[in-house]
């Protein structure tokens, strides 16, 4: 083979961008130059048993048990599920419903931190070339790894498509298109080797696949670094995508990176792709090469209400209020606190919630732009249609949703919405388009599940 | 720590563009035409414009008051309607004309159908056509202090020669705001630059209109004739400011092209085969009526439907 995979990849129809999308103020300057700092939890740690899509994990500890750092405290309940691990040593204080970021009460294991951080002895791991594919997958399933970009889909399920030979691309989502978020950026800058090692593990599962590191062009330092580190890798290439929200949305990312398009009913595997987030890939590296379960994640604590915006390496289960404290507290009273990015994150009314596997950021805004503007009537400007990456007509769908006209909603492809929020962002009448459509989608999905 | 924070569904940020800011930019974009109209036709034009805007705003306020609805005057949409209506009137009309037109535009065309965003027809154009039918002689009398005799389009229809240069500049008879192609294009460029309008509708409208003329006017590729047709009458004002009215044009991308082509053909039919020299207003309101159908047949195909492998 004279031509390298890297060059070939570029010719295979990569679009480098997608249709629609927006360019909001990105706010990344607040925290992008702050190195990742590890923080230790002080208060109790709370582990919801459902931090992923799929069956909630089953607690395997009792109230009063002593647990060690890295000990499994809840086991997966089925294939599409993920176990939960203790991230400190201490005593199980309670197993009870606790509030999580979405506002729901979820059964959680509460561990009182004894401050000793005694760690369990991890199993010895075989070097990667000696492991079978099934051993690798089992290892990832054991480690409780889920999609850490926000969706929380169990990673071992993603890595077990029906036909592994049909996978052509293993894409690492390094786009980080959400405004304000810099956790992936810092991770790529500070620990790029781990990212590449993790990608190599994923590639070991798919014999015909090329690894793509898909980075937005607003991160030139990362691109340079990753290109340099992968220049001798036959199977890995860096693909530079144009900066635009939602470039990191799975279907848009696949299209930009490979030119393949799928609809909402299809899986990335149908287009021969597997997509994982940066933190997820690093977690794969820890699980397979070091034998450690998923215990940390990088969280960006930022926003104009935060004294010292930071990127923290946080033990999962740490209380959000502690993160704010460690970031210097508030400089001004925040009107709105968001878990995640401003486009797809959850508004919080209470800071007393734990960091979960999917929490990428804690954003504190002094002014809430949403409540400041009263929604008005639609003037049919078509801006929502222009920006919709799913190519639907959000203003019409929102009308159908508000009238509970499920039939028209489905007929006009309401389920193709990816809830990215672009339509609400651009709407000059400030209508809550995404919210309406999202509610209707939830309703439809719940009905389908029942059937 | 809890219960004083604002919680809402995503997204948590919003763009700066509002309905009001859009309306404001349309008003600014109409100012060159309005100013030129005042310069061209004198003080009376300014009075007509002010009366028209005032009667539109007042009818909206009164209607909202009577119906116990919240005031919607802040969104400036009635000002746009009033301004557009005045720019579509000849300068010689009596002062009660914009009052009737304004009330009809706001109350009948807009508010009775549910207010902003619900009207199926451009209010200013609806009112203009209403006045045109009701007071034909007053509405088609273009004699005034500065100009007497026929509009360039009427001359063109009669097979007479027109002065293209003064038509482009706007030193001709006509309604207050339609005569100057230059002034209208300055405003249009402003809106295009801001992204308030795009070229889909004006582009397909003008192109299909020219194509129709080349095929059916009997003059073929007569550059002077085509330019005069483009510069004359309400075509420019209609294409850039009325056909692009958000509420009454298709929201889908392909629907907008279809809409433009339809308008081009209809304007051509009215101007060439109709009894009157002008046809833009009727073409646009006819197009407005077909918008729901156009949207229906051009509903976009969602991203990746069925999957595409490159």
Image: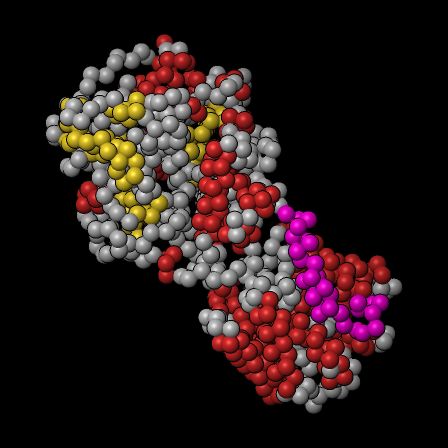
Q: Is residue B187 above or below residue A193?
A: below
Q: Is A108 situated above or below A429?
A: above
Residue A95 x/y as whole percent: 22, 30
Q: Which residues are magenta?
A: B270-299
Q: Nearer the viewer, residue A393 or B211?
A: A393
Instruction: Give coordinates of residue B149: x percent, y percent.
Output: 78, 85
Residue sitting at x 19%, y 49%? A329
Q: Residue at x 24, y 24 (%)?
A: A73
Q: Residue B278 lies in magenta, yes or no?
A: yes
Q: Looking at the image, which residue sits at the far right?
A: B218
Farthest residue, direction top: A130
Instruction: Give the residue furthest to the front.
Output: A451
Residue A287 image-quadrant placement: top left
Q: Position of residue B250 (x, y in %)?
A: 63, 56
- Does A204 appear in magenta? no
B143 relative to B203, above or below: below
Question: Does the image show residue A343?
Answer: yes
> With B217 as the anchor, is B234 left or right in this view?
left
């Amino acid at each position: 083979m004279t031509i390298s995979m890297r060059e070939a990849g570029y010719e295979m129809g990569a679009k480098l961008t997608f249709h629609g999308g927006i360019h909001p103020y990105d706010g990344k300057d607040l925290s992008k130059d702050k190195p990742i700092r590890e923080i230790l939890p002080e208060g109790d740690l709370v582990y919801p048993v459902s931090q992923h899509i799929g069956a909630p994990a089953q607690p395997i500890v009792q109230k009063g048990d002593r647990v060690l750092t890295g000990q499994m405290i809840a086991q997966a309940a089925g294939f599409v599920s993920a176990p939960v691990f203790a991230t400190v040593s201490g005593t199980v204080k309670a197993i009870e419903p606790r509030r999580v970021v979405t506002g729901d009460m979820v059964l959680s294991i509460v561990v009182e931190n004894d401050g000793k951080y005694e760690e369990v002895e991890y199993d010895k791991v075989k070097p990667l070339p000696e492991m079978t594919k099934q051993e690798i997958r089992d290892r990832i399933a054991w480690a409780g790894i889920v999609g850490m970009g926000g969706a929380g889909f169990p990673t071992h399920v993603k890595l077990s498509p029906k036909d592994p030979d049909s996978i052509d691309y293993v894409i690492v989502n390094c786009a980080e298109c959400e405004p304000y978020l810099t956790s992936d950026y810092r991770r790529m800058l500070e620990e790029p080797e781990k990212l590449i090692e993790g990608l190599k593990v994923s590639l070991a599962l798919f014999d015909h696949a090329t690894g793509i590191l898909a980075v937005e062009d607003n991160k030139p330092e990362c691109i340079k670094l990753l290109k340099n580190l992968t220049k001798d890798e036959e199977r890995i290439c860096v693909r530079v995508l144009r900066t635009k929200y939602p470039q990191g949305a799975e279907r848009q990312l696949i299209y930009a990176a490979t030119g393949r398009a799928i609809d909402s009913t299809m899986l990335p595997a149908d287009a021969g792709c597997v997509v994982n987030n940066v933190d997820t890939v690093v977690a794969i590296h820890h699980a397979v090469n070091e034998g450690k379960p998923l215990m940390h994640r990088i969280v960006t604590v930022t926003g104009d209400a935060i004294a010292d915006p930071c990127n923290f390496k946080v033990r999962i289960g740490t209380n959000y209020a502690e993160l704010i404290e460690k970031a210097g507290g508030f400089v001004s009273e925040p009107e709105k606190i968001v878990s995640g990015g401003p486009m797809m994150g959850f508004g919080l009314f209470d800071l007393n919630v734990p960091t979960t596997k999917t929490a990428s950021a804690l954003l504190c805004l002094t002014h809430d732009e949403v409540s400041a503007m009263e929604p008005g009537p639609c003037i049919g400007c078509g801006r929502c249609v222009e920006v919709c990456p799913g190519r639907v007509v959000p203003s019409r769908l929102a009308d159908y949703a508000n009238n509970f006209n499920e039939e028209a909603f489905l007929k006009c492809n309401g389920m193709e919405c990816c809830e990215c929020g672009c339509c609400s962002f651009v709407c000059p009448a400030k209508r809550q388009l995404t919210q309406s459509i999202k509610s209707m989608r939830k309703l439809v999905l719940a009905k389908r599940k029942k059937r | 720590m809890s219960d004083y924070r604002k919680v809402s569904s995503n997204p948590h940020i919003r763009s700066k563009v509002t309905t009001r800011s859009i309306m404001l930019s349309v008003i600014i974009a109409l100012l060159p035409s309005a100013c030129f109209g005042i310069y061209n036709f004198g003080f009376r034009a300014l009075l007509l414009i002010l009366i028209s805007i005032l009667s539109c705003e007042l009818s909206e306020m009164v209607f909202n008051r009577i119906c116990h609805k919240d005031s919607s005057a802040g969104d400036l949409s009635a000002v746009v309607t009033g301004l557009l209506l005045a720019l579509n009137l000849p300068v010689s009309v009596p002062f009660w004309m914009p009052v009737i037109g304004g009330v009809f535009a706001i109350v009948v065309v807009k508010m009775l159908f549910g207010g902003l965003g619900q009207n199926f027809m451009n209010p200013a154009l609806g009112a203009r056509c209403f006045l045109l039918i009701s007071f034909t002689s007053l509405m088609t009398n273009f004699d005034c202090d500065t100009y007497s005799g026929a509009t360039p389009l009427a001359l063109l229809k009669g097979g007479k020669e027109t002065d293209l240069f003064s038509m482009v500049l706007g030193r001709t008879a006509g309604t207050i705001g339609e005569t100057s192609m230059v002034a209208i294009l300055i405003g249009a460029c402003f809106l295009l630059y801001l992204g308030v309008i795009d070229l889909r509708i004006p582009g397909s409208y003008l192109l299909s209109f020219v194509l129709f003329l080349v095929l059916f006017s009997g003059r073929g590729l007569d550059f002077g004739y085509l330019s005069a047709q483009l510069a004359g009458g309400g075509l420019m004002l209609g294409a850039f400011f009325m056909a692009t009215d958000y509420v009454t044009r298709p929201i889908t991308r392909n629907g907008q092209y279809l809409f433009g082509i339809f308008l081009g053909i209809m304007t051509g039919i009215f101007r060439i085969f109709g009894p009157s020299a002008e046809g833009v207003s009727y073409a646009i309101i006819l197009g407005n009526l077909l918008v729901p159908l156009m949207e229906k047949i051009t509903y976009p195909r969602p991203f990746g439907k069925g999957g595409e492998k490159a």
